[in-house]
Image: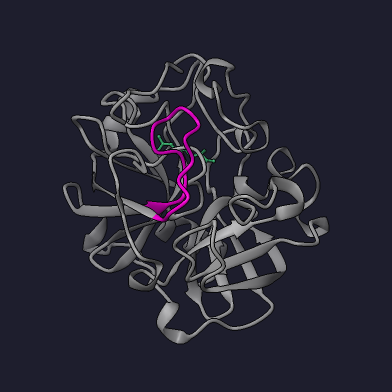
Amino acid sequence: MRRPTARSLAGVPALIAAAVVTTPAMSVPAAADSVVVGGYEVRADDSPWVVALASRDRFGPARSGQFCGGVVVAPTKVMTAAHCLSNAVLGKDAASVRDLRVIAGRSELAGNGGREVPVRETWVTPAYDPVTNSADMALLTLGEALPEDHVLPVAGPGDPAYEVGTAATVYGWGDTQGNGSYASSLRAARVSVLPDETCANAYPGGQGSRYAPSTMLCAGDPQGGHDACQGDSGGPLVAEGRLIGLVSWGSGCGRPDGPGVYTRVSAVVRSAGTG
Ligand code: ARG
């Protein structure tokens, strides 16, 4: 887990700040117009596969304890980012967080719509590297099954949904401005799949993070303004009705020179042998 810089975290509550993966050498204040900088409100019922990961013990009751996003990939399986389950985020082993829950069907975190389902088991892909943030994927096994119609199909290797220029939508309850303004309602932002070179140029490594195309996916808005942000991690990037990415990291939010980096789901699922 990379150390966030103080600057990129101004105003971000300390506990959520722990979830942030930034590039120290490149961190700059987020653009003011930055989803789910540049996003719009959506109803959880219209995108039932988006879920919130929550722990009130750790993150407090105000926003139902939300701290990351996730996506339903089978009735009892939720996929999320591995870094969401790190000690740095949870303050302890995921297995010892007693009230780790998935919240399905609740658009408004201040309310009590939808349902809360306990997480029975957590599994982080052995391919995950917390230093490089490569293969940032984990699976949660739920204590109760969600309806079959909550399941989002996962795009496999070679799926055309990964092609550069494909329109994609990212969902989450994260920061809407890049300054600690956490959304209370579910939001979505429209982005597109960007060439690997765009992220390789933006994130060349050295002092900062390095983009690794084999396990990561580059997406955003070349003009800036539409992006995922802090608190959206683990949430889905959806194209052509299929899951292509999980919110993983980026430099600032919505910056034209800091595209969003997502977990390339086809690659990590294959290497994990889960499908
Ligand atoms: N690491 C962040 C989190 O834990 C997600 C950051 C995504 N940033 C971006 N600019 N797309 O919530």
Tally of numbered tags: 0
Q: In this view, does 225 lie to the left or right of 150?
A: left
Q: Does the magenta portion include 92?
A: no
Whether residue 172 is situated above or below residue 229 in the rendered picture: below
Whether residue 247 is situated above or below residue 236 in the rendered picture: above
Whether residue 115 is situated above or below residue 87 in the rendered picture: below
Q: Colour scheme of this structure image?
A: one colour
Measuring from the top left, give residue 146's x and y in whole percent: 54, 81
Residue 9, quarter of picture? top right
What's the magenta region? 171-186
The answer to which of 138 and 117 lies nearer the viewer is 117
Q: Quadrant of the N terminus?
A: top right
Residue 162, quarter of picture? bottom left
Residue 81 shows in the view: no
The answer to which of 270 and 120 lies nearer the viewer is 120
Q: Does the magenta portion include 183?
A: yes
Measuring from the top left, give residue 159's x and y in whole percent: 27, 64
